[in-house]
Amino acid sequence: MLGQDVCLTIAGNKTDLEKNRAVPASEAEEYAASVGATHVLTSAKLNRCIEDLFLNLSRRMIEVAESNDEQHRNSLGRGGSSRRNVVIVEDEPQPKRGCCGG
């Protein structure tokens, strides 16, 4: 479902309120796997797994970026180009109007 450049983590929050769980953890994990995401149970109130979630997500994002850089360098070695075209289009100057729109 996701592109190769996207890192997605689904946070099952409020684990401190386990008795009020609306979605079984197994269902959330199954869904996460089906969309190429990871699933982490968290509790902001208890500060449980919040930092780990962001650290793991950040690591995965760095790995994807490094992999993309390596693929880009490899394509340059096969005759690819690193040039990007940028086109700047100037806005048409608007006629000046009086202070009351007239």
Image: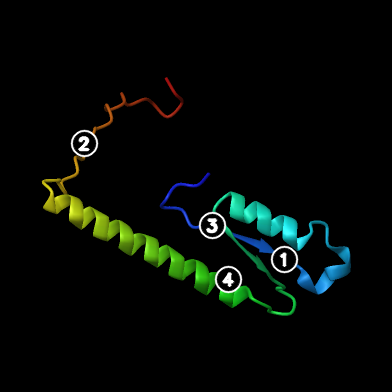
Mark 3 lies on a secondary structure that is loop
From the viewer's perspective, is 72 left or right of 20?
left
Q: Which residue is mark 3?
A: 8
Q: Nearer the viewer, mark 2 or mark 1?
A: 1
Mark nearer the N terminus (2 vs 3): 3
Which one is in front, 92 or 47?
A: 47
**Cα–Cα gap, marks 2 and 1:** 45 Å
What is the three-letter code of the residue carrying label 3? Leu
**Cα–Cα gap, marks 1 and 3:** 15 Å
**Cα–Cα gap, marks 2 and 4:** 40 Å
Q: Nearer the viewer, mark 2 or mark 3?
A: 3
Report if the CB atoms under discs 3 and 4 are less than 8 Å apart.
no
Mark 4 lies on a secondary structure that is helix
What is the three-letter code of the residue carrying label 2? Val
Report if the CB atoms under discs 2 and 3 are less than 8 Å apart.
no
Q: Which residue is mark 2?
A: 87
What is the three-letter code of the residue carrying label 4? Leu
**At x 19% / y 50%, what residue is drawn?**
75
**Cα–Cα gap, marks 1 and 4:** 11 Å
Residue 98 numbered tag:
none
What is the three-letter code of the residue carrying label 1? Asn
From the viewer's perspective, is 52 left or right of 78?
right
Report if the CB atoms under discs 1 and 4 are less than 8 Å apart.
no
- Residue 55 place in picture, x, y as percent: 51, 74
From the viewer's perspective, is 50 left or right of 5?
right
Q: Residues within 10 Å of mark 1 (few under 14, many from 20)?
A: some
Q: Which residue is mark 4?
A: 53
Mark nearer the N terminus (1 vs 4): 1
Residue 13 numbered tag:
1
**At x 21% / y 36%, what residue is drawn?**
87
Mark nearer the N terminus (2 vs 1): 1
- Residue 49 place in picture, x, y as percent: 64, 76
